[in-house]
Amino acid sequence: MPYKQITCFLLLACNTFIANAKVSFVTTDLQTEQISATLYIPKQSGKMSAVIVLGGSSGHRNTVYPELLATHGIVAMSLAYFRSQGLPNTLDEIPIETVSDALDYLQNHPQVNANNLGILGVSRGSELAFLSATNDPRITAVAGIVPSSVAWHGQISPHAWTIKGKPLPSVTFPRQSEESIYERSTAALTQNSASYAQFQFEKINGSLLLISAKNDHIWPSSLMANKIMTYLKQHNFTHSTYHLSVNDNHFIDQKTRDGYAQLLVDHFR
């Protein structure tokens, strides 16, 4: 049956049929005044869960996790939040409402179960994922890959994120130093509580999955994931939580991803 384009938004359609050993899917590029994204639709009938995927500080749309989810029958939207048409050029003062607009779109998609919307953030994308999930109850499942427990500074300005036009508190460290970013970010976390910039994880309206890297060389994702788990316990979080720490660096390789792929799929289903 031919793929039907959604007409409730302006689309720059680029339909590609991709064969896969599991479920094949269709990709469509979306470009509206609010959204710059690629949509991955599994070629199967019925309404499906949907997940917004946020990449890291490169600004590129993540392709790895949308493809993984789509081949398992989950609609995925790889959403750009900077360095794309109509968006800021740098990771500075990004409105978290960018995600709310994407959720509006998915809610109205005829193949999406509007009651089962999730979000996955990789590296700095985890910050936006957590901020969105704590402010929008429509999100009922959240995953952070090599995640952060706090909001960090922007690439140029002191703030990476805004809500309703107001900058959100952020942790900062010296931009120029002989020390690595890992050393600087670890010091920034341990030299003060950084509680002023910690996300209010207890406000998440659903389950939370964290996948950190024991040998992370960019920032201390395992340390931060442990901080999140401790915070949730202290705040009597009622939804399910799980933290998997893998023997890998910040750029988790395919073999490691294959090892936790089913865990991730089950989480969003």
Image (cartoon, rainbow, N blue to C red):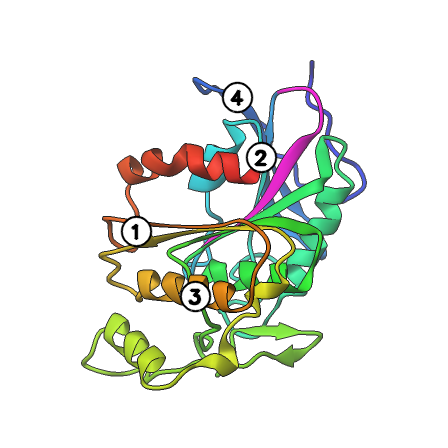
Residue 102 appears left or right of 123 = right
Which mark is drawn over residue 63?
Answer: none
Mark 4 residue type:
Ser
Q: Mark 2 vs mark 3: which is more N-terminal? A: 3
Residue 255 appears left or right of 66 = left
Give SS at disc 1: loop
Q: CA distance from mark 4 to mark 1?
A: 26 Å
The relative height of residue 106 versus residue 95 in the rendered view (above or below) is: above
Q: Nearer the viewer, residue 11 or 185?
A: 185
Q: Quadrant of the N terminus?
A: top right
Mark 2 residue type:
Arg
- Residue 71 seen by the camera: yes
Give SS at disc 2: loop
Give the label, 4 or 2, closer to the camera: 2
**Magenta segment:** 44-55
Label 2 Cα neighbours within 10 Å, binned few <14 / some 14-19 / many ≥20: some
Q: Circle 2 sits on which residue?
A: 269
Q: Circle 3 sits on which residue?
A: 230
Residue 31 appears left or right of 181 = right
Label 1 Cα neighbours within 10 Å, binned few <14 / some 14-19 / many ≥20: some
Q: Mark 4 vs mark 1: which is more N-terminal? A: 4
Q: Nearer the viewer, residue 232 or 43?
A: 232
Q: CA distance from mark 2 to mark 3?
A: 26 Å
> Which residue shows up at 72% across the image and 35% down it?
113
Q: CA distance from mark 3 to mark 1?
A: 25 Å
Give the label, 4 or 3, closer to the camera: 3
Q: Circle 1 sits on which residue?
A: 251
> Which residue shows up at 50% across the image and 27% down it?
71
Mark 3 residue type:
Thr
